[in-house]
Image (cartoon, helix red, strand yellow):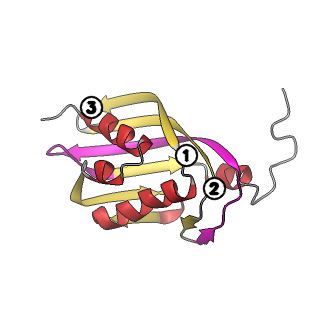
Amino acid sequence: MANIEELIERGNQAFNRHDVDGVLSLYADNAEMKGPGGMVSKGKDEIRRFTEGWIQGFPDCKITVTNRIVSGNTLVEEGVFTGTHTGTFPTPMGDIPPTGGKVEGEFVDIFVVENDKVVSDRLTFDRLQLMEQLGLIPAPAGAGAGA
């Protein structure tokens, strides 16, 4: 059995290389990914579209892991996503044309692994913060002010 931390780290490295096939090689055929706003991707084809969408919208994107917690066959990962919105970003609400905005946002991802494959992936991130950073909605008064 593969070490769960090594398995997920291989996926992170593949994502940072924009190697979608490398990312998908870690998922079971019937894997399910859930994300904010009721997003559900079932199976590798839907997970591929989700992953490719981020790379398409943010061609320089990368993730940096800040913490990992492992319990049995479950790994919880905290990290930061960074990228520049220079491509069309497909979302459930429609495509977002490039804004040129730079984004940096924290995420939490919970992976469940069985037989050396990810069977469940639960991603959480602040969608409102993402939209603010892209300039699609106004930031709250005082946001970014030095404290």
User: x, y percentage for residue 52?
Assistant: 44, 59
The residue wearing badge 2 is: 86
| Amino acid identity at mark 2 | Thr
- Residue at figure coordinates x 32%, y 49% from the top left: 23
As measured in the structure, the alpha-carbon distance from the residue carrying label 3 to the one carrying label 2 is 31 Å
- Disc number lying in front (1 or 3): 1
- Residue at figure coordinates x 14%, y 45% from the top left: 115
The residue wearing badge 1 is: 60
Q: Are marks 2 and 1 in contact (CB under 8 Å)?
A: yes
Q: Is residue 147 left or right of residue 120?
A: right
Where does the N terminus fall, quadrant-wise? top left
User: x, y percentage for residue 117?
Assistant: 21, 47
| Amino acid identity at mark 3 | Glu
Residue numbers of the magenta segment: 93-120
The residue wearing badge 3 is: 6
Circle 1 SS class? loop
Q: With respect to residue 90, does 4 lie above or below? A: above
Q: Can the viewer see residue 71? A: no
Q: With respect to residue 65, does 139 lie above or below? A: below
As measured in the structure, the alpha-carbon distance from the residue carrying label 1 to the one carrying label 3 is 24 Å
- Residue at figure coordinates x 59%, y 72% from the top left: 93
